Amino acid sequence: MLMIEQTDRISFGLFELDLAAGELWRAGHKVRLASQPFKVLTTLVAKPGEVVTREELQAKVWGDNVNIDFERALAGAVNKVREALGDSAENPRFIQTLTKRGYRFIAPVTFVRSPQKTAVVAPPGESEAETHEAAYTHPAVAEHRTDPFVGEVASSRSKPDRRRFLPLLLPIGLAALAFGLALVVVWFWKLRPDPGPLEIDQLTHTVAISAGPPNRENLLNLATDGNRILTSVMEGGRPRLSAISIGTGEVQNLPLPQELASSVLTDISRDGTRLLLKSHSSSASEQALWVVPSSGGSALRVGGVLAHDAAWMPDGASILYANGNDLAVIRLDDGVSTPFAKLNGRAFWMRWSPDGKVLRYTLQDPVSHNSGIWEMQSAGETPRRLLGLQEEQGAACCGSWTSDGSAYILQVGDNLWQLKGHGFTSSLSQLTNGPLRYLSPVTARIGSRIYFIGLDRPFGMQQFDARQGFHPAPAFLANASRVDYSRDGVWVAWTDNDQKLWRARAADGSDKVQLTPRYLEVFMAHWSPDSSRLAVMAREPGKVWRTYLVNADGGTPQPVLNENRNAADPGWSADGQSLVFGREPDLMGKESGSHAIQIVHLANMQTEMLPDSEGMFSPRWSPDGRWIVALSLNQQSVMIYDVAARRWKELARTSAADPIWSADSKAVYIHAFLAEKQPILKIDVPDGGMHVIADLNGFRDPAIVSYFFGGVTPANELLVQPKNGTGDLYTLDLKTR
């Protein structure tokens, strides 16, 4: 390990400390940081992953200077460092506070020194001439696993005449020895030390590459024709398919017909001349497919098929497309479609190997939503699971072959990994390790480079009122995603970004309690009218979403219905004796049965279906019990049900998500997420008058391009979680590994 005294520079993520000059840089731009905060940062990064005590910081930074208020000076210096890094104490990416102990630097760190100061040993596969700097990458938190020993040959218990069996034993022994040596070589190769994350270069700095809407089926595609990266870029609040020059970072919008203005890229032909696009005219999963030149222009509709993803076949004359759980191939010349495979889930990111022999794809389970990489070699062949990393590393998805077919680059959780080899001889190594979210890798057409998107971590919860506009919500709600207040305003419950359910006093966040066990993933929760319990939409990993009842003081969650179908959006009747619930739309999980609104009576657990509610979801019962609102499955209409008259009508025609009732039952708030500026609307009940309460213009940070509507306070103030829905383009060279 290079000690800090021997180091010229220290890099972490997009940042670099120049120790000689006493400067902090971010992606080539100098960041202003005063002397004492710089010393604090240097002291912390010198011991990544370790606790640096307050006493150690005092000695390193302030020495014997006793004429200062040390506590205030240290807190101020740490705050200055966090401001420079864009970090926060509540959701740290770099500096973690350890109460009454000190601080810890939690991001991976690379210590770098110039070649003239030290001899450099090139890593495997890299010559000394190719090595420009000596670097040691220090992961802040490292896990070391060893696989069990393969085995050893047992000695014989009997002693027959050795001469009799010598001709037979000799070749067997030699074969066993060769096999054993092969095992040793393979296992040592697979368990060789991971050289650590590679150096990442940022190609764009002001380009807002669209990451798309935050749902589980949004797996952003990139493509390259060799000189450009093709993807969607935000312009005027809307995504536009664009080409980004790899050499200069210059962005050029592709001219497309009006009906494809919001289209989604799925693939590029092998010769780089034709793009395959999917319409995005609504929120429906299956959309029309189109072929357009890679420079833009006129579009050709691909037969009459609908698909949620598609890819070019190796012959360039036909297209593989995914509809529901089926794969099929359609020929472009005559539009004839033939079945290719029936799967156990929905396929995305279909990618053929360079030799056209192996198809790999991301498969999403329709119920559990877990994703993994699968492969098959020909039509009708039984697919096989390639990787099973969800349990240890996060969902695996979105892979691309290198140009020579020797490796497969994929996304696991928020980082990129490389898979080399096949079957028993395969090896998996991590390429990135934060601090950004890295996704959607695409490989160069020639050479060893890969390109990908880097996204910042989410913003904290924001609150909106007419006087202040958007401003930070109370600190205890910073990590909240969905928030619900009890009807008396005393308590607040929320789900956090880790899908856990909490409750606390609404006034100050005191009496904070986690209400659900670690094994449950919670999507949302609503208070009962008497504030004694909550109706919770949750699931065990890999299982269906169910409705649970949880006491306000905690305890074991009690399931309401024993169904093997997803049940969603539970809401209370005014008397607290019944729950309304719906089913999930396709974006959350494929439902083969009815999509109707139902009511379960808790006294006897009997259910009834609301009349004429087929094709609706996301129900919300008004606090006074008179109305139930729901959304159409395409999320283009807000419907309202008169409970007494047992009759539906359309309340408003607009894109809509996450309806929330006002406390007086006189209005419903919805997020018009597909409308320009994505406003939150207040819709009067029952006449349907619509009023814009807030939209994207209310955010001061230009990096915020989308947001999630998370709740309404008792004072009718909005709660939203801003989304940094755009990122920049990054690259790394696999050759340096």
Image: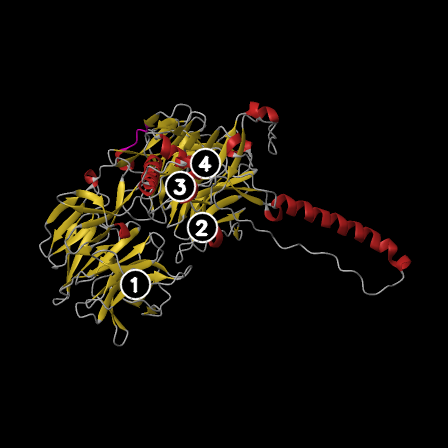
Tell me where residue 230 sits by quadrant.
top left
User: Going from the N terminus, do you reach mark 2 or mark 1 first?
Assistant: 2
The residue mark sitting in front, 2 or 3, is 3
Tell me where residue 499 sits by quadrant.
bottom left
- What is the spatial separation of the Cα atoms under label 2 and label 3, in whole angstroms? 21 Å
* Residue nearest the viewer, comparing 247 with 595: 247
Quadrant where the C terminus is found in the figure: top right
Residue that label 3 marks: 94
**Discs 2, 3 touching: Cβ within 8 Å:** no
- What is the spatial separation of the Cα atoms under label 3 and label 1, in whole angstroms? 34 Å
User: Going from the N terminus, do you reach mark 2 or mark 4 first?
Assistant: 2
Q: Main secondary structure of the magenta part?
A: loop
Return the mark for residue 459: none
User: Going from the N terminus, do you reach mark 4 or mark 3 first?
Assistant: 3
Q: Residues within 10 Å of mark 1 (few under 14, many from 20)?
A: many
* Residue nearest the viewer, comparing 546 with 599: 546
| Extent of the magenta region | 253-257
- In the displayed image of the protein, which residue is found farthest to the bottom? 604
Q: Is residue 516 left or right of residue 113?
A: left
Q: Secondary structure at mark 1?
A: strand
What amino acid type should be assigned to the residue bearing mark 3?
Phe
User: Going from the N terminus, do you reach mark 2 or mark 3 first?
Assistant: 3
Return the mark for residue 536: 1
**Discs 4, 3 touching: Cβ within 8 Å:** no
Is residue 156 shown above or below 455?
A: below
What amino acid type should be assigned to the residue bearing mark 1?
Val
- What is the spatial separation of the Cα atoms under label 4 and label 3, in whole angstroms? 28 Å
Residue that label 4 marks: 442
